[in-house]
Amino acid sequence: MISFSSLEELRRRKSEKWRRFSADVLPLPVAEMDVEIAASIKSALIDMVERSDTGYLGLIPELGSAFSSFALDRWGWQVDPIRVRVAVDVGVAAIEVSRLFVNPGDRILVNSPVYQNFYTWITELHCEMVDAPMIEIERDGIRTHRLDLAGIERAYASGVKVHILCNPHNPLGIIFTREELSTIADLAKEHHVLVISDEIHSPLLYNSKEFVPFLSLSDNAREVGVTVTSASKAWNLAGLKCAQLVSASDRIESKLRALPEAVHFRTSLFGAIAAVAAYQKGREWVDQLAQELDRKQRLLNNLLHEHLPTTYLHKPFFGYLGWVDLRDSGLGDDPGKELLERAKVAFNSGHTYGPAGKGFVRFNFGTSDEIITEAVNRMRKVIGV
Ligand SMILES: Cc1ncc(COP(=O)(O)O)c(C=O)c1O
């Protein structure tokens, strides 16, 4: 049921991942997968094209209902369908919400190394970025990371207005505990901080029950939080352009009423219909995909362990993005650049996610086993020789 396209087929794709590099490069950056999309989504889109239903997006109550039913079924999270709004993508959702809470010059908190566009969103808002970096630790024999809650408290107390929380965390591949998230909610309430919980990767947890939606936590979380999410990562629909923006308290809801109407109308009808199909009919598909990705992260880990023992994959708990430590592999601070130039394999360079990303790459393993294996083979050409 889950099928990944062949390299020949992928080279015909028109997306950024497959157009950015020349044909001699194997491209594994850009967070999109090489999977064939779910049949239910495909048929919903084909049906629209066949009927020339290619106009603007208007009322779309079925999206709120579909998301609400999905969230309840998966995480036991009760979402009021009328509090599910749309925006063209998660970036626009986060920026438009932030605009209601910040003025230029205000401070916005992130936890680096983190999804690099959080920085561009803050620049677009003319705000100042504040960082409470993740802390690298060892737990149960594996290298992982945890939030610096004391650092977050200090940042909140220093006057931060918004905290953009990557929940679960890209690129580190970790999920947060109920306790960590509750502490954030309580601190945010105390210091009047808006928490924007970016949950775009949440449907792809290998064990779906472990994910804690921020707004499901407590009254405090609902008072301070907005969730931005999308079907675009988990069902591979990024080009279709539709994100969801969820609120769960009267306080936040009254602020969101000031969002420009255009935030809704700029969203794509195709994206919205695809999201409805994903949340309603793509549940089994996404569970199978998550299992398949879990197998792939183990394959990647084994390949690196066997052939490139100086490298270390930080075990991901969801999705298709692997945070690979190459600090002991002799490729310097930007191994991504070296690997592209010398091995013709492209990854995202770790330093673009924050200073602690120096010496790392983000490896997109949402592709066929053959391509994963070929990428590691290419890495072998320049590591350990
Ligand atoms: C954490 C996170 N948020 C947002 C996005 C981008 O979402 P969108 O294309 O809907 O803006 C990504 C893409 O990789 C991501 O990893």
Image (spheres, rainbow, N blue to C red):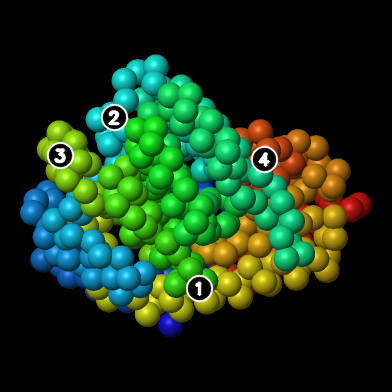
Q: Is residue 286 above or below residue 266?
A: below
**Dot 3, crowdedness within 10 Å: few (<14), some or many (≥20)?**
few
The disc labelled 1 sits on which kind of residue? Asn
For the N terminus, the image quarter is: bottom left
The residue that disc 3 covers is: 254
Whole-Å distance between the Cαs marked 3 and 1?
35 Å
**Dot 1, crowdedness within 10 Å: few (<14), some or many (≥20)?**
some
Sequence order check, earlier mark of 1 and 4: 1
Q: Residue furthest top?
A: 105
- Point out residue 327 in the picture as x, y percentages from the top left corner: 80, 44
Sequence order check, earlier mark of 3 and 2: 2
Sequence order check, earlier mark of 3 and 4: 3
The residue that disc 4 covers is: 357
Q: As rendered, which of 59 and 152 lies closer to the eye?
A: 152
Q: Is residue 260 above or below residue 67?
A: above
Depth check, mark 1 against mark 4: the one in front is: 1
The disc labelled 2 sits on which kind of residue? Phe
Sequence order check, earlier mark of 3 and 1: 1
Depth check, mark 4 against mark 2: the one in front is: 2
The disc labelled 4 sits on which kind of residue? Gly
Tags 4 and 2 in contact by the CB under 8 Å rule?
no
The residue that disc 1 covers is: 207
- Point out residue 191 in the picture as x, y percentages from the top left corner: 39, 32
Whole-Å distance between the Cαs marked 1 and 2?
34 Å
The disc labelled 3 sits on which kind of residue? Ser
**What mark, if any, has residue 101 been given in the picture?**
2
In the picture, measured across the screen, residue 100 lies left or right of residue 313, that is left
Q: Residue furthest right?
A: 385
Q: Residue at x 32, y 70 (%)?
A: 76
Tags 3 and 2 in contact by the CB under 8 Å rule?
no
In the picture, measured across the screen, residue 222 lies left or right of residue 183, that is left
